Image: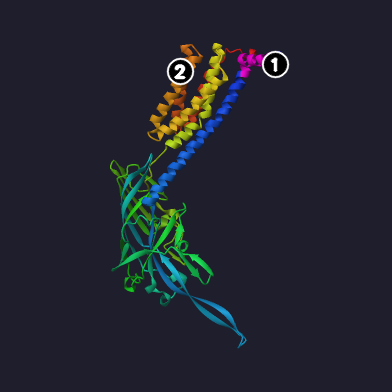
Amino acid sequence: MDKTQGKTGKLGSWIKTSISARMITVGILILLLLIPLSYVTNLIKERQYRQKEVVNEINKKWGEEVLLYGPILKVPYKSYKTKKVFDQKSNRYREEITEIIKEAYFFPDTLDISSNINPEEKKRGIYKTAVYSSNINVTGSFISPDFSEQDIKVEDILWEKSRLIVKTSNLKGVSSLIEIQFNKNKYPLTSKYKGTLHSASLGKETDLYHVNSERTYDGSILHRLESKFIAKEDMPTKNKVNFSMKITINGSKQVQFVPIGKETNVSIVSNWKTANFIGEFLPYNSDKISEDGFNAKWKIIDINRPFPQQYFNAIPNVKEYAFGVNFMIPVDEYQKSERSSKYGFLVIGLTFLIFFLLQTISKVSIHPFQYLMIGIALVMFYTLLISISEHSNFLKAYVIAGISVVVLISLYAKSIIKTIKFVSFIGVSLTLLYTFIFIIIQLENYALLVGSVGLFVILACVMYASRKIDWQNG
């Protein structure tokens, strides 16, 4: 028993007096504190996911993002397929001609879109998003369809079976009937039936929702609206035909248009002051943003985008060339909290280093449990930062969390290190450290440069402070 107590006493004495033992202990504590720090990172991601979940739910009820693609003129035509069939009676092959109905799709010659959009904030709990009501006016013209490239005869064109097609990502938000004035008559647009139809040719049920809808490159559904048959006298068989259409629609996130006109002109007017222009094309007018909102204008001609004005047999997938405006509210509190948590290891390591140097210089004994309490207080900074930033801005949350932790650690240090000079040094060091981290978080282009210079200065200070420590006796 005496030998065991003697060995324990020697071990405790070695840990208390040896610099190497204290360094090992502090290093182990830093590694252990990485566990709660990882939980903080997971908490930030969980809150981010919750925020996206609530925003998507609000947007879904109000109306999803708006992507408008059209109008497109669909003209059916006859095609003939010749195949040889063996006739057993004559013991010869004979030619059999089968008539097939195919479809040609023509884009407008001119397409002019003017839209007035008035976004507003919608809140649920602590989360908010931007939704809007929009009035979209679409005008333009079609020229006579050209079938010469496909060697299609005029008598094989089924003008009386032609339709107009408009595609949009948001049907739920449409608040009025959609009619298109085409030449002299109006044609209502209706959506395709969402259901199943038994296909005799395939011997199975076909989902009409997927036949008449398609997904955009970001995964959202693009619905298809079609008009009834267009009267032959309204068709641009000889002369150019004008069209016009008005759409009143509720949406969220963003509004985009596809430039399918040979010349496409788009104008979007809004009172939204934080405009974010997205897509393949940017507005051309330099005075687009003002104190009252923005008035953005685009002009795209066919040479600017890599697709022609007409297609045969299928509508092309050109939605990736859409452009428009994003109205989402920039919520970067979670991103900044996540960035600050990435410096958690640095903050804990440098704080422990400060206490280690003061302990070594002043010969004051600091127990590993006291190091652990200081480390937990440093981790609590991030939970305070996340929770406060959800109800306030990031700067205010950072200042409140920083002051709380600095004061807490300084008061705790006063009970360990009785010297006011050392306690003040700890408080000033932590304040400078948190200020340094905040500056790095705010910077984008110079974050690496400022961070590298700051760490170099910190290293120089540590080397200067530790120059007189007798490491040989540790």
- Percent x, y of residue 266: 34, 53
Q: Which mark is residue 381?
A: none
Q: Nearer the viewer, residue 24 or 168?
A: 24
- 447 sits to left or right of 289: right
Q: Nearer the viewer, residue 318 or 352?
A: 352
Give how far across and how far down residue 442 sits, in percent: 43, 32
Q: Is residue 85 magenta?
A: no
In the rendered structure, which disc, 1 or 2, sits on the residue that comes first in sequence?
Answer: 1
Q: Distance between the Cα atoms at labels 1 and 2?
A: 38 Å
Residue type, numbered disc 2: Leu
Q: What is the total number of numbered labels drawn onto the structure image?
A: 2
Q: Which secondary structure dominates the residues rendered in magenta?
A: helix
- Taking the view exactly as shown, the residue that stands out farthest to the bottom is 89
Vertical arrangement, residue 474 with respect to residue 32, above or below: above
* Figure check: 192 above or below 82: above
Residue drawn at x 41%, y 77% as measured from the top left: 155
Q: Which residues are magenta?
A: 4-21
Crowding at mark 2 (Cα within 10 Å: few <14, some 14-19, many 20+): some
Q: Residue furthest front?
A: 1
Which is more foreground, mark 1 or mark 2?
1
Density class for disc 1 (Cα within 10 Å; few <14, some 14-19, many ≥20) is few
Residue 453 can be seen in this image = no
- Regarding mark 1 in the picture, which secondary structure is present there? helix
Residue placed under numbered mark 1 in the picture: 4
> Taking 457 as reference, is 168 above or below it?
below
Which residue in the structure is indicated by mark 2?
A: 411
Q: Residue 192's spot in the image, x, y percent?
A: 41, 64
